[in-house]
Image (cartoon, rainbow, N blue to C red):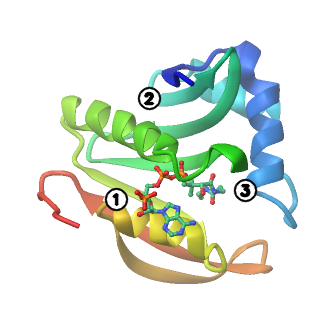
Amino acid sequence: MDVVVRLATAADAQHIADMSGRLIEYGLPRSWLAPRIVRHVHRRDDLVIKAVSANTIIGFAIMSFADEAAHLNLLAVEPRWRRRAVGRRLLTWLEETAACAGTFFVSLEVRAENHGARRFYRALGYDETELITGYYNGVEDAIVFARDLSVCHTR
Ligand SMILES: CC(C)(COP(=O)(O)OP(=O)(O)OC[C@H]1O[C@@H](n2cnc3c(N)ncnc32)[C@H](O)[C@@H]1OP(=O)(O)O)[C@@H](O)C(=O)NCCC(=O)NCCS
């Protein structure tokens, strides 16, 4: 089945918020509700993208850009689509956009217990740089990942 990556629109916000609650924020108070997603869709310094198959959103990612660095806020792929390079395509799309804009440093936080995601980011050239205790509402620690896009990784 073909998968395409596109910019998300405000009409996708509720679907993306539902995916975030189900796939990322499970067990935590919800902080990524539809109005917040809409704000990111409209902000000039943010990108909200979606992976679509057969007119259905199967993955999404949200990145915020600053002059020197970009921050990946959220990334998720529907469970039945995992390990088919959808996450890699979404992240690579954002990294290429960041590099085109002259932004070479990308960072993100992951729930410490999310070992699958931690392996994903390591596989894509990210290094674990920090542990932030209780980052997620005191419920769970965060691992900070970072990648310098100007450095070529071979993993
Ligand atoms: C993390 C996530 C986005 C990865 O998406 P994906 O589409 O399955 O990832 P890909 O297929 O592009 O994986 C690329 C590589 O990462 C590594 N990888 C990905 N998921 C992995 C896992 N669960 N365990 C071990 N390695 C993994 C592999 O090396 C993989 O390559 P391979 O399949 O050829 O071995 C997905 O598991 C997900 O949505 N998880 C829930 C939400 C989440 O944790 N988001 C991240 C924090 S915001």
Above or below residue 14? Residue 55 is: above
Asked which secondary structure carries label 3, the reply is: loop
Q: Quadrant of residue 24?
A: bottom right
Q: Quadrant of residue 116?
A: bottom right
**Dot 1, crowdedness within 10 Å: few (<14), some or many (≥20)?**
some
For label 3, the residue is: 24
Above or below residue 70? Residue 146 is: below
Q: Are marks 1 and 3 in contact (CB under 8 Å)?
A: no
Asked which secondary structure carries label 1, the reply is: loop
Question: Is the C-beta of the residue carrying label 1 under 8 Å from the nearest atom of ligand 1?
Answer: yes
- Compute the Cα span from label 1 to label 3: 19 Å
59 sits left or right of 71 in the view: right
The residue that appears at 57% across and 25% down in the rendered structure is 1
Q: Nearer the viewer, mark 3 or mark 2?
A: 3
Q: Amino acid at mark 1?
A: Leu
For label 1, the residue is: 124
**Dot 2, crowdedness within 10 Å: few (<14), some or many (≥20)?**
few
The residue that appears at 41% across and 38% down in the rendered structure is 89
How far across and down, in percent of the image, does residue 92 sit? 35, 41
Q: Which mark is residue 45?
A: 2
Q: Amino acid at mark 2?
A: Asp
The residue that appears at 62% across and 22% down in the rendered structure is 53
Give the mark nearest the N terminus, 2 or 1: 2
